[in-house]
Image (cartoon, rainbow, N blue to C red):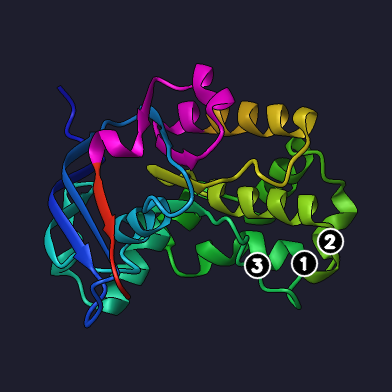
Amino acid sequence: MAAPVLALEGLEFQWPGRTGFALQVPGFQLLPGETVLLLGESGSGKSTLLSLICGTLLATRGTVRVAGTDLADLSGGQRDRFRAEQIGVIFQQFNLLPFGTVADNILLPLRFAPDRRRRAGDGRARALMLCQALGLPEAVLSARAGTLSVGQQQRVAVARALIGEPPLLVADEPTSALDAGTQAAFLDLLFEQARACGSALLMVSHDPRLAARFDRVLQMEDIAHSKRGAA
């Protein structure tokens, strides 16, 4: 059996100095090439869990291992570089650089990840291919990201996550701004790219209609215990 690309064990998180929210994940694994949909309502801790997986938050207790590396063993700068190499992230709020061009935004992860840059080959050609597959015209590469529609910005964020074939793809409500037709095209591309490089995909959503496409579908309460109290 292949080693998991993502492994959580005894994970606990609580904001320092606050008692309003706590998250516990006894155990969870994601295998190479596996696709998992994690469903949960707003406030259930989905985005917090993704931040722990990406290393932008550190667990209070327990371990988060990505590709065999315990994120707690890395410094802040090392986690940033590791995330750029190993994880393609599709943020719910896009996190694009509004004054940068679309090409600048898509190619940004490659600036910090030499292995990922090598996998991408001709980065601009790859960015164009991803844009066209997502229904964006070639001319959009030179447009400033802040001038695009919400749906276009979402697709640029998807292309940025896919470029360079990272082994782990993490997606936070990536279809929320897309219409039904574009949503289907996006999911087709996302699964195609994940299969092409053997990437694992973890997507969080509140939409159970996406379930049929995934290898596994879990409710947030299946893997995690969260609680809210007085802030």
Residue 145, label in figure: 1
Label 3 residue SS: loop
User: Which residue shows up at 58% across the image and 66% down it?
Assistant: 108
State left or right for residue 93 relative to residue 68.
Answer: right
| Magenta segment boundaries in residue numbering | 194-223
Query: x, y (%) of residue 52?
Result: 30, 60
Q: Are marks 2 and 1 in contact (CB under 8 Å)?
A: yes
- Residue type at mark 3: give it: Leu
The crowding category of the residue bearing disc 3, from other C-alpha atoms within 10 Å (few below 14, some 14 to 19, many at least 20), is many
Q: Is residue 225 above or below residue 184?
A: below
User: Which residue shows up at 63% across the image and 26% down it?
Assistant: 188
Q: Which residue is mark 2?
A: 148
Structural distance between the alpha carbons of marks 2 and 1: 6 Å
Q: Which residue is mark 3?
A: 96
Of 163 and 95, the residue lying toward us:
95
Residue 34, label in figure: none
Report the number of discs.
Answer: 3
Query: x, y (%) of residue 82?
Result: 32, 63
Q: Are marks 3 and 1 in contact (CB under 8 Å)?
A: yes
Label 2 residue SS: loop
Structural distance between the alpha carbons of marks 3 and 2: 11 Å
User: Which residue shows up at 31% across the image and 55% down it?
Assistant: 53
State left or right for residue 175 relative to residue 210.
Answer: right
Q: Identify the image quadrant of the N terminus.
A: top left
